[in-house]
């Protein structure tokens, strides 16, 4: 039996959850949007993700929420709300990043790519669930003229029911993450439930300073053995970071009920993080990498050496098994003759050190590359949260 204090703590947590605005995260991946939502003050009522490896990692980091491994096309608004345990009309937000390969400038960019239909499906579910707001994230390519018809067809499903902001191009480094990753955000809200918002509200929460690669990687081991390839071998000690706004969010910022208890304990008590796995490079490759100056690209691998005083370029996810399981090009460490580790990639994307990814290096990189930076997610959803919990708008 639970001790009285433990039981009371759980009851208090459940009570607090019931008062938080609730969101559903579609195409949840490893949880970049989910973490941002939780940090902004929301209760993630449901996470939907089809990829088995991604949802398994999501469950580790969000152990107390409901997970659904389901194809979005098999769901309608009624089913989605039922799985979330939310009554019709009571969902606060629907958030998600529909798969973007059909729109990506590094892909085939076909207007008939079947994955483009997932963007439309997201808005179908918005129309059926009637949340107070929605946030959809995608690559910048979706804003191109050739996809105008796809955008308009999807947005027509909610136009008239929601105030639609013009699509916003948001750079992760503007919100305190050490990466130049830029994405398109589609945001809409119900006028009867949310105070007026404009793009200026999101400009107001931008970071006052830029975080460099050097600051982001501070405290992580630079010497990584190529033989460290298993999850257990990737567990390594880190040293304390200099106290900044960035390090505070990397080290702390753990919402109640979020995170794997053992991973958090291991990090807090022993300063051990996961994901410090190496990559086997031949002597020839190491020599090439060693000769590169900061910012230079290796002609063979196309990998770029990171600049200590610069930003990390957009981290790519590579392809899934159905597309050949190709590994994405990874940046080269700024001082070592190797590509970066999953934990270094996580830091550069803005994930905290206690956050967990798949046991394998390949799936870890896919999950990080596919994810929204938690820094951006938290900033965007904090703005919406502040508008949502304010007193009802005057009619």
Image: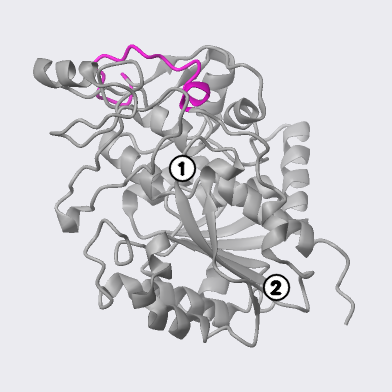
Q: What residue is at 16 percent from the left and 15 percent from the top?
A: 287
- Density class for disc 2 (Cα within 10 Å; few <14, some 14-19, many ≥20) is some
Q: What residue is at 70 percent from the left and 48 percent from the top?
A: 205
State the image coordinates of residue 267 (x, y, percent, origin top left): 53, 21
Q: Secondary structure at mark 1?
A: loop
Q: How many marks?
A: 2
Nearer the viewer's eye, disc 1 or disc 2?
A: 1
Q: Secondary structure at mark 2?
A: loop
Q: What residue is at 45 percent from the left and 17 percent from the top?
A: 220
Which of the 4 image quadrants contains residue 300? top left
Q: Which residues are magenta?
A: 213-233
Q: Is residue 168 magenta?
A: no
Relative to residue 79, is residue 197 depicted above or below?
above
State the image coordinates of residue 314 (x, y, percent, origin top left): 38, 44
Frontmost residue, 18 versus 180: 180
Could you give the CA–CA distance between mark 1 and mark 2, rounded to whole angstroms? 36 Å
Q: What residue is at 56 percent from the left and 22 percent from the top?
A: 265
Relative to residue 255, is residue 228 depicted above or below?
above
Quick check: 329 left or right of 333?
left
Mark earlier in primary sequence (1, 2): 2
State the image coordinates of residue 104 (x, y, percent, origin top left): 32, 60
The C terminus - image quarter: bottom right
Q: Which residue is mark 1?
A: 180
Q: Is residue 328 visible?
A: yes
Quick check: 363 left or right of 90?
left
Which of the 4 image quadrants contains residue 78? bottom right
Q: Main secondary structure of the magenta part?
A: loop
Frontmost residue, 382 versus 290: 290
Q: Which residue is mark 2?
A: 90
State the image coordinates of residue 131 (x, y, percent, origin top left): 64, 73
The N terminus - image quarter: top right
């Amino acid at each position: 039996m639970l001790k009285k204090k433990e039981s009371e703590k759980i009851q208090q947590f459940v009570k607090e959850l019931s008062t938080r605005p609730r969101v559903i995260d579609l195409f949840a991946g490893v949880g970049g949007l989910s973490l941002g939502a939780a940090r902004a003050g929301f209760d993630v009522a449901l996470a939907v993700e089809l990829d088995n490896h991604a949802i398994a990692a999501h469950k580790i980091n969000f152990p107390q929420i409901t997970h659904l491994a389901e194809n979005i096309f098999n769901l309608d608004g009624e089913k989605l709300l039922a799985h979330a345990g939310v009554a019709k009309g009571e969902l606060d937000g629907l958030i998600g990043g529909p798969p973007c390969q059909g729109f990506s400038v590094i892909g085939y960019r076909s207007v008939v790519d079947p994955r483009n239909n997932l963007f439309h499906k997201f808005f179908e579910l918005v129309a059926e669930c009637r949340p107070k707001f929605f946030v959809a994230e995608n690559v910048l390519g979706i804003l191109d003229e050739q996809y105008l018809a796809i955008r308009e067809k999807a947005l027509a499903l909610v136009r008239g029911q929601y105030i639609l902001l013009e699509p916003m191009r948001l750079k992760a480094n503007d919100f305190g993450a050490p990466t130049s990753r830029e994405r398109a955000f589609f945001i809409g809200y119900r006028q009867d439930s949310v105070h007026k918002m404009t793009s200026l509200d999101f400009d107001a929460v931008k970071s006052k300073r830029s975080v460099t690669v050097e600051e982001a990687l501070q405290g992580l081991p630079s010497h990584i053995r190529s033989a460290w390839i298993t999850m257990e071998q990737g567990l390594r000690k880190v040293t304390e970071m200099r106290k900044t706004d960035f390090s505070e969010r990397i080290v702390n910022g753990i919402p109640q009920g979020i995170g794997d208890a053992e991973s958090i304990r291991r990090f807090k008590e022993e300063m051990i993080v996961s994901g410090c796995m190496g990559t086997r490079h031949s002597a020839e490759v190491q020599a090439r990498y060693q000769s590169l100056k900061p910012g230079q690209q290796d002609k063979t691998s196309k990998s770029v050496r990171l600049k200590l005083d610069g930003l990390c370029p957009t981290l790519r996810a590579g392809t899934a098994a159905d597309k050949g399981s190709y590994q994405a090009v990874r940046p080269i460490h700024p001082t070592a003759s190797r590509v970066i580790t999953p934990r270094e990639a996580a830091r550069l994307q803005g994930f905290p050190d206690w956050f967990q990814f798949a046991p394998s290096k390949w799936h870890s990189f896919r999950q990080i590359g596919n994810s929204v930076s938690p820094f951006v997610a938290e900033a965007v959803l904090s703005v919406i949260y502040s508008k949502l919990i304010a007193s009802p708008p005057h009619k």
